[in-house]
Image (cartoon, helix red, strand yellow):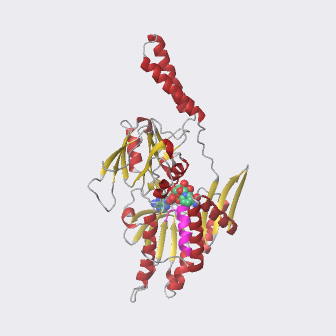
Amino acid sequence: PGEQFVPDPSKKTLVILGTGWGSVALLKNLDTENYNVIHRSIMEPVRAILRHKKGAANYYEAEATSVDTERKVITVVDNSEVKGATSTTEIPYDMLVVGVGAENATFGIPGVREHSCFLKEIGDAQRIRKKIMDCVETAALRGQSDEEMNRLMHMVVVGGGPTGVEFAGELQDFFEEDIKKLVPGISPRFKVTLIEALPNVLPSFSKQLIDYTENTLREEKIEIMTKTMVKKVTDNTVEAEISKPDGTKERVEIPYGLLVWATGNAVRPIVKDMMSRIPAQKDSRRGLAVNEYLVVQGARDVWAIGDCAVAGYAPTAQTESLETRIHDLSSKMNLQAGNSAADANEIEQLEKQLRRIKDVKPFRYSHQGSLAYIGSEKAVADVSWWNGNLATGGSMTYLFWRSAYLSMCFSTRNRVLVILDWLKSKAFGRDISRE
Ligand code: NAD
């Protein structure tokens, strides 16, 4: 209806769900002249990319709630604050790429969703900045009790993976470089605590780098509580269970001003929904099982990329199943001796598909290593180069970390903006406004 997106009937309609790294990288590299592209997401800059694309490319800002892989349609809901007369609609596709990422894992721990801040989307970062400054200003209010000042200035980060470690380091930097100067009277009360259920932080890094990280964080005055599992969260306390060396457990209550939850990824509802509708996905747990061409197992013309996809299936599965199908059909035709033109057509189609698949190189994940910022302009890196391994930490690694982040920007424009932001906050301090 209306003067909306009119797909070119001679081209296939490709729908991409999501605007994370995977989806945007795909969109950037895609020759949009060959498809009708429809993109959905909850972030804006994608419109800027589409503006420069030739061919019919369209963008809807809405949440995809279900995918019917039989009818090849997606149901989307506009759940923004501004509502129009239409808020739910269906989008048909010929080909679908699912790149919706993951959501925050909370393991159903009571109070987490209501009281903590996450670290996934832009809104999360804005919320955190506002909350930090609100805590500082409330702590500085005349007449605030000692106990309340200490609570408000206590910033708790749960989850000692790369997200939690990097955030704790950044937060301490923010305090040292900016906040401390602004509120000298109460600044000694500022404290960052990092809580991790396992015996150490950054479990995927080597022992040497774990020790380096924990020592550096402690030097930065970040308190690290390991073997501490958060069990419940209220609006101003975290209740956790500490496993003691003698095997006993102790329950503690930790008052906080800001709580940031970073305990990893969980499967998004739309991905769960797809997994439950596709029988071949019934044994998959962490996301859509894909083959080496990123084709979603058990669905036609659907691909998955990024955190919502789980690779690890037999590398030749798809070609083999096509070959078997062609073989079955031709045996059937032989039996019926030239009987079915439809079957002959199907064989031709399948053979074409097979040739195409054999032409395309399979996707192989190559682990380049792990890299994390740990605060005070230091970073740790576990990188595999050629045949060797490099485990390094410190200020040079920090420069490497910065360059790695720059290389992940999709455009020169963004790269320049990021460098300018870094220089700006170095020269004039971080932005502490709350809007
Ligand atoms: P993660 O899964 O790596 O770590 C989460 C941590 O939370 C785990 O160590 C877990 O033991 C702990 N945890 C879970 N429940 C807990 C509880 N109730 N109480 C206390 N601790 C609890 O998650 P992440 O750090 O968000 O990382 C997710 C993915 O993103 C990873 O693949 C990571 O490598 C990647 N990542 C990479 C970088 C980087 O390269 N610098 C930065 C951020 C994220």
User: Residue 349's spot in the image, x, y percent?
Assistant: 49, 26
- What residue is rendered at 70% in x and 67% in y? 396
Q: Is residue 111 above or below residue 146?
A: above
User: Does the magenta segment cover residue 139?
Assistant: no
Q: Residue at x 54, y 80 (%)?
A: 178
Q: Characterize the magenta stretch by its predominant secondary structure.
A: helix
Q: What is the total number of numbered labels drawn onto the structure image?
A: 0
Which region shows up in magenta? 158-173
Residue 81 sits in quarter = bottom left
Query: In front: 305, or 207?
Result: 305
Residue 394 location in percent, x, y? 68, 68
The image shows residue 153, relative to residue 347, as above or below, that is below
Coordinates of residue 60 in the picture (x, y in percent): 39, 53
Identify the image quadrant of the C terminus: bottom left
Q: Residue furthest left?
A: 85
Q: Residue at 50% of width from left, 44% of height from top?
A: 33
Q: Is residue 240 visible to us here?
A: no
